[in-house]
Image: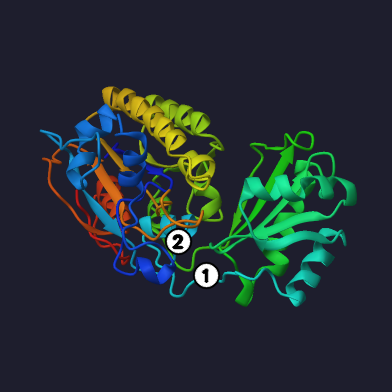
Amino acid sequence: MARRAFVVVIDAAGAGALPDTVAYGDPADSDTLAHVAEAVGGLRLPTLQALGLGCIRPILGVPPATAPVLHGRLAPQGPGKESTTGHWELMGVVAPAPLPVYPDGFPPAVLARLDAVVGGTGFLCNAPYSGTDVIRDFGARHLRTGKLILYTSADSVLQLAAHHDVLCEEALLERCARVRHEVMVGPHAVGRVIARPFAGPPGAFRRTEGRRDFAVRPPGRSYLDVLSERGVPVHAVGKTHDLFAGVGFTHEHPGSSNARALAETSVLVDELDHGLVFVNLVETDQLYGHRKDPDGFHVALQRIDAEVARWLARLGSDDLLVLTADHGVDPTAPHTDHTREHVPLLARFAGDAGREHHGPFADVGASVHAWLAGARNSGLTGRSFV
């Protein structure tokens, strides 16, 4: 079968609290899309509305569709509320235990090992911090001293920020790769070591598009592995490749911005013969969610909505399109971190018949496997909806 599947993750576009949301320090009514909609006076997303986004749950400005595609909400089976575990679960890998987090910063023993690996520069910050605030608050001192900016968040991450004038992007990536493989292992195996290059003068620092995520390897086989081993091309667009440490992918395409990721996906919609395209659209999370900017979040959704309309005009009966998310980042939460939420599911394919489907994240991977390989017995978690 010369079929194609496109799985598009709208990062952080959560769709309502899970039963254990409060245990993660999030409001009991966490609901990213609904609260973004309320903040902007209603979402205006004609394509997603027609596909059935308003059939999933009440969202201001998005009424239920008259002829929706398959729609519903998905829930994680494992712990966490971050991109790494969220994307893993979409492809059938459930983390057996929470990934390590550092709410009080990294301990002295880890700091000493980190410093030896990065060259003895020393560090600034070493605490949970907003990525934009940390360069605003520590950037000038970083320029004066040469010390790298080290920070984390509520997620299982270690982030290193460096100005281009202190450490070139290539050198920052090299140090982060060494941190990933030489230090943050074993009990300290965080989900991601993230390189955060930035540029500009004090007072006008800006993060560049050179971000790179060095993820821990998934703890088990995924549907990406199953498909690639069967000879099915598996394409990554954006940070999906990094989140799986490259495991299971056969091709990688850039996508550090939504514009680039959408453009790369559009080329694949036009030119790909068969296979899976797994896309992450990062800006709803990175640029707008963490910064509590519902207007920016809405504009990003509108640009996605317009591009999806163009894809739909070019997709055929042998194509599966899945639109979903990996977690939430509710702008009404008292913090700037992710929120533990359901994620939306919209799936357009021949025979979708407007059905409602609710289940675990892994149903996405199971469905892609069934669609592309014509098989259901993969040995992995998840139930196909196709």
Q: Please state if 9 lies on the left or on the right of 201 as rendered.
A: left
Instruction: Tell me the CA gap for discs 1 and 2.
Output: 9 Å
Q: Please state if 256 lies on the left or on the right of 49 as rendered.
A: right
Say which label, 1 or 2, has the lower sequence index.
Answer: 2
Which residue is the site of mark 2?
A: 85
Counting from the top left corner in percent of width and height, residue 172 is at: 76, 49
Q: Which mark is residue 120?
A: none
Counting from the top left corner in percent of width and height, residue 107 is at: 71, 74
- Residue 268 visible somewhere in the drawing: yes
Which residue is the site of mark 1?
A: 99
Render colour scheme: rainbow
Counting from the top left corner in percent of width and height, residue 94 is at: 40, 67
- Residue 79 visible somewhere in the drawing: no
Provide the secondary structure element on which disc 1 rests.
Answer: loop
Q: Assess whether mark 2 and mark 1 are in contact (beta carbons under 8 angstroms).
A: yes
Q: Residue at x 50, y 29 (%)?
A: 259
Q: Nearer the viewer, residue 153 or 256?
A: 153
How packed is label 2: few (under 14 Cα within 10 Å), some, or many (20 or more)? many
Q: Amino acid at mark 2?
A: Thr
Q: Nearer the viewer, residue 226 or 32?
A: 32
Q: Quadrant of residue 47?
A: top left
How packed is label 1: few (under 14 Cα within 10 Å), some, or many (20 or more)? many
Counting from the top left corner in percent of width and height, residue 375 is at: 24, 55
Q: Amino acid at mark 1?
A: Leu
- The count of marks equals 2
Q: Nearer the viewer, residue 275 or 197?
A: 197
Q: Residue at x 46, y 75 (%)?
A: 97
Q: Residue at x 50, y 57 (%)?
A: 335
Provide the secondary structure element on which disc 2 rests.
Answer: helix
User: Is residue 20 shown above or below 34?
Assistant: below
Quadrant occupied by the N terminus: top left
